[in-house]
Amino acid sequence: MPEGDTVWLAARRMNTALAGSELRRGELRVPHLAAVDLAGVDVREVVPRGKHLLIRLADDRTLRTHLRMDGSWHLYRPDSTWRGGPAFAIRAVLVTDQWAAVGYRLHDMALVPTTDEDSLVGHLGPDLLGPDWDLDEALRRLRADPDQQIGVALLDQRNLAGIGNLYKVESLFLCGVHPWARVADVPDLPRLLERARTLMLANLEHPEQSTTGSLRRGEDHWVAGRRGRPCRRCGTTILLGDQGPDLRERVTWWCPRCQAAPAPVDRSARTGEPGRPRPLVADR
C-alpha cells in the first residue's frame, strides 16, 4: 500500500494539472457512481489526507479515492495515448483542456458534499504530512492502547495517518525499537514519530523513497527488503516475519541486535513463524 508521501506527491501533481480548470469530461466508472457526469464542473483543489486523495470540486462536492495496493493516477496530455493499464482497469477519467487524469484500479471511491468529508476521513488520526499534524494527539491515541505491538499501532491510521510498512520498519530500526515491542515499552515514543515524519518529509519531492540518504538501488534502505543480509550497522543478519492480524499480516524486517526487545515479545517475532491472532488494525 502506498505510503503517505506517495499520495502527497500524486495529489500535488494532480492539483497542479487540474486545479482551477473546468472538466470537459468527467466519468466515474464504478457501479454506484456510473450515472455521475462531472463535465462542466471546475476543480477547486486536490489534497491528500493520509493515504486518501480528495478532489474538491467547485460545486461543493468532494471525490475521494484510495490507491490501496494496486491503484494509481496517471496524467496525460489530452491527445496522448493512455498507457497506465488496460481500459477495463480505468475507474475515473477527468479531462480538462490541458490534461487528462486517468485513475486505474482505484478503490473506495465516493462522492460527497465537501462539508461531509469527515464521513470519509474523519476517523483518521493526525496526518504526518498535513497541516493538522499534532504530535501530542498522535501520542495520546497510541498510548490509549499501551499493550498493542508498536509495529501494528504505527500502521493503524486511526492513531496517525500516512505511515506505511516501509516507514514503519525503517523508523523502528533507526530508533532501535523492536517491531513486536508493546507501545508502553517504547522508550522514546515522540522521537520515533518524529523520525518517521522526517523520513517522509525527506522524500516528498521525488518518487524514490530513500531512508539512508542514498538513491542508489540496494543502498536506499536500512532493513526493508534486506532479509538474510548483514545489518548496515552491526553486521547481524536481518530477519523477516509477518506481523498483524490473520489475513492482513505485513512483512516486517528488523535487526535482532540493533533492535533488541527490552521486554519479552511474541515468539513469532524471533522466528518468523505464524503467531496467535492479533487485534484487527485499521490500516487505511
Image (tube, rainbow, N blue to C red):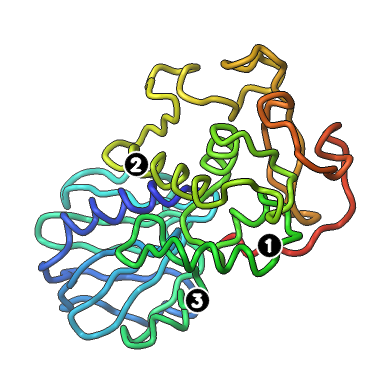
Looking at the image, which residue sits at the far front? 187
**Does residue 19 appear to the left or right of 75 in the view shown?**
left
- The image shows residue 58 at horizontal and vertical percentages of 18, 80
Choose mark 1 or mark 3, whichever is in front: 1
Tell me, yes or no, if residue 70 can be seen here: no
**Does residue 30 appear to the left or right of 253 in the view shown?**
left
- The image shows residue 227 at horizontal and vertical percentages of 69, 23
Disc 2 and disc 1: Cα gap in Å?
35 Å
Q: Return the residue at label 3.
A: 31
Q: Is residue 137 above or below residue 76?
A: below
- The image shows residue 228 at horizontal and vertical percentages of 72, 17
Quadrant position of the C terminus in the picture: bottom right
Residue 281 numbered tag: 1
Disc 3 and disc 2: Cα gap in Å?
24 Å
What amino acid type is highlighted by mark number 3? Pro
What amino acid type is highlighted by mark number 2? Arg
Q: Based on the displayed image, in which of its 4 quarters is residue 206 positioned?
A: top left
Q: Nearer the viewer, residue 219 or 46?
A: 219
Q: Based on the displayed image, in which of its 4 quarters is residue 115 positioned?
A: bottom left
Disc 1 and disc 3: Cα gap in Å?
28 Å
Q: Earlier in the sequence, mark 3 or mark 2?
A: 3
For the residues bearing labels 3 and 2, Cβ distance under 8 angstroms = no
Q: Dot 1, how many residues are within 10 Å of its Cα: few (below 14), some (14-19), or many (20+)? A: some
Q: Earlier in the sequence, mark 2 or mark 1?
A: 2
Residue visible at 74% across and 64% down in the picture: 280
Q: Return the residue at label 2.
A: 83
Residue visible at 54% across and 62% down in the picture: 139
